[in-house]
Image (cartoon, coloured by chain):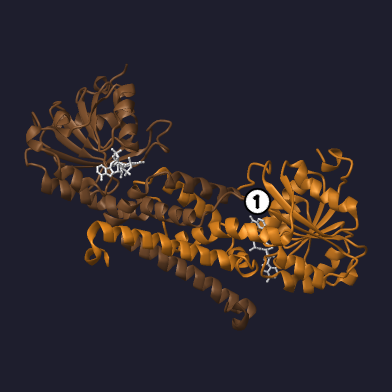
Chain colours: A brown, B orange
Amino acid sequence: MATASSSTSSSRPLKIGIIGFGTFGQFLSKTMIKQGHTITATSRSDHSQLCSHLGISFYREIDGFLEAENDVIMLCTSILSLPEVVKSIPFHRLKRPALFVDVLSVKEYPKQVLLQVLPPELDILCTHPMFGPDSGRDGWKDLIFVYDRVRIRDEIVCSSFLQIFATEGCKMLEMSCEEHDKLAARSQFLTHIICRTLSEMAIESTSIDTKNFQTLVKLTESTTNNSFDLFCGLFIHNRFAKEELKNLEVALEKVKQKLHDRMNEELGPSVSRI
Amino acid sequence: MATASSSTSSSRPLKIGIIGFGTFGQFLSKTMIKQGHTITATSRSDHSQLCSHLGISFYREIDGFLEAENDVIMLCTSILSLPEVVKSIPFHRLKRPALFVDVLSVKEYPKQVLLQVLPPELDILCTHPMFGPDSGRDGWKDLIFVYDRVRIRDEIVCSSFLQIFATEGCKMLEMSCEEHDKLAARSQFLTHIICRTLSEMAIESTSIDTKNFQTLVKLTESTTNNSFDLFCGLFIHNRFAKEELKNLEVALEKVKQKLHDRMNEELGPSVSRI
Ligand SMILES: NC(=O)c1ccc[n+]([C@@H]2O[C@H](COP(=O)([O-])OP(=O)(O)OC[C@H]3O[C@@H](n4cnc5c(N)ncnc54)[C@H](OP(=O)(O)O)[C@@H]3O)[C@@H](O)[C@H]2O)c1
Ligand SMILES: NC(=O)c1ccc[n+]([C@@H]2O[C@H](COP(=O)([O-])OP(=O)(O)OC[C@H]3O[C@@H](n4cnc5c(N)ncnc54)[C@H](OP(=O)(O)O)[C@@H]3O)[C@@H](O)[C@H]2O)c1
């Protein structure tokens, strides 16, 4: 089995503990195992069966999990549950300092929570792999990995962790959490709000779909495959999202106004005021 | 050169006159020429240079155009200009009855205009090829062709015309104009209003696009390549479009409400009321 460690001098096999073994934690773990890293996991729900299939040690209790001497603790819980999860970690159980990495789809918020709650001797790397089980189905090549080295002292562990994504061919983008959130609100969140709206309308394929409408239907299915918690997290904990929702509403109103103005011109105001 | 007429017994080479030689008229004419049909055209603007390249006789004046003894007159003008264009046709100039075909992206409206304005001896076929220069770039196979045989007496000319699209592999769907408009408002028009809204927001590719956002950007570019007149026509002359715009607004409002409700639960009402 090829390991990440063989590809550059700055990487080595890691012991990675995952907190939150839902859709995304599971997805990431598979590639990490393939690369030769050792994975342990803990989660609110019992994922022990799946873990035993994957060769992952699953701990129902966080205490045993923390005592497993991981190099990296990766937080893969929902955005909304992050503070609750992080505050409940008994950090004194850690046998040695570890790099804490979060993979939340918003970035300023976990940075702030981790800086507040984590003991100062623990390193912090905030990341957002801009892909998931759907878009990363056929590998991670050319998919984007955003990260912010918030508090790094152990360079070897940090670069070994980043190497996992670099090895798969991800575009590695170092970026401030603020910059990430600004751009993501205008791209990822916008995609989600539009697809949630179309899903609320219950749009579906018709017998006379144009290709572009077919694309929209597929996009809606793919986007709403993500949990509703994730969507809520994108909105509640990205301070730029509210502004983009407002921008969307204003733009829709403007387009509507243009249509009504044109209708007035064409048909006269009495007909068009419906 | 393969001709449509060779593929079934019910088709023969046609003389087709196009009124409105814009983007879509040009697009259709190329395949018709390839199939061995003879094309003449007339339009508001002067397209004589392009026509001479394509081997099409272009008439600046409608009188000469009508005297060319076409089997089919195909109306490819904008939705908004249809009544003005049709009312200005000096029908007495026609040497013999022809099949009038429209290709407008709305269907109840041209049906009504043509039934009102055309002399009763002229046949009427209302159609909507559900594709264009973008989606039909690599051929028309499996693309949808909707038609309603509004007033047909010359079966041979009508079926020869339909055969043009069947030969290219289109899915041929006979459907009432009303049914078309109902479905198209909830698919094609919805795609257009969303893409026009995103275009109004001036969305563009970022350095951290997800695949789904990239899809949305391309969709917006492709959809707004259509003329603004076409978009206005979809709204003004499809009576179901207003309802779907309303449905879209209501759905967006509902999604927003769900987000705010969740934010209230998470943060408490004082924080979330922004
Ligand atoms: N899915 C993606 O494509 C994607 C891409 C990039 C980043 N992310 C990020 O990855 C994280 C996980 O995403 P996801 O897709 O798996 O779905 P999610 O709904 O955002 O998160 C599900 C995970 O959160 C845990 N969780 C939820 N509520 C909890 C609570 N009250 N207490 C403790 N744990 C709780 C779940 O644990 P149990 O399973 O044990 O119940 C599960 O592990 C999110 O932060 C998301 O923003 C996801
Ligand atoms: N584009 C597509 O993908 C597509 C697909 C299916 C159906 N259609 C339908 O095909 C028709 C043509 O569409 P299009 O894409 O070419 O763009 P369009 O903007 O809908 O129509 C342009 C055509 O309308 C003519 N026109 C516009 N205003 C006019 C006026 N006041 N008087 C006379 N002629 C006028 C133009 O003539 P000049 O060029 O001479 O100025 C040109 O031929 C529309 O009814 C549309 O709904 C289009």
Q: Position of residue B96 (x, y in %)?
A: 93, 63
At x 45% / y 44%, what residue is drawn? A222
- The residue labelled by disc 1 is A208
Name the foreground residue: A202 vs A198. Answer: A202
Please state which of residues B51 and B161 is positioned toward the viewer in this rendering: B161
- Residue B27 higher or lower than A144, as above or below: below
Q: Name the one closer to the observer, B51 or A6.
A: A6
Q: In the rendered view, would you say A46 is above or below B270?
A: above
Q: Is residue A152 above or below residue B42?
A: above
Q: Secondary structure at mark 1?
A: loop
Chain to which mark 1 belongs: A
Is residue A122 visible in this depiction of the protein?
yes
Q: Is residue A134 left or right of residue A113?
A: right
Q: Quadrant of ligand 1?
A: top left
Residue B105 in view, yes or no: no
Residue A133 appears at what percent x and percent y? 39, 36
Q: Looking at mark 1, is its residue's CB closer than 8 Å to ligand 2?
A: no
> From the viewer's perspective, is B135 left or right of B111?
left
Instruction: Give residue B75's quadrant in the image.
Output: bottom right
Residue at image point 82% right, 41% down: B3
Looking at the rendered image, the quarter that the C terminus of chain A falls into is bottom right
| Residue at image location 57% in from the left, 74% down from the top | A262
Count of labels shown?
1
Residue A29 at x, y percent in the picture: 30, 29
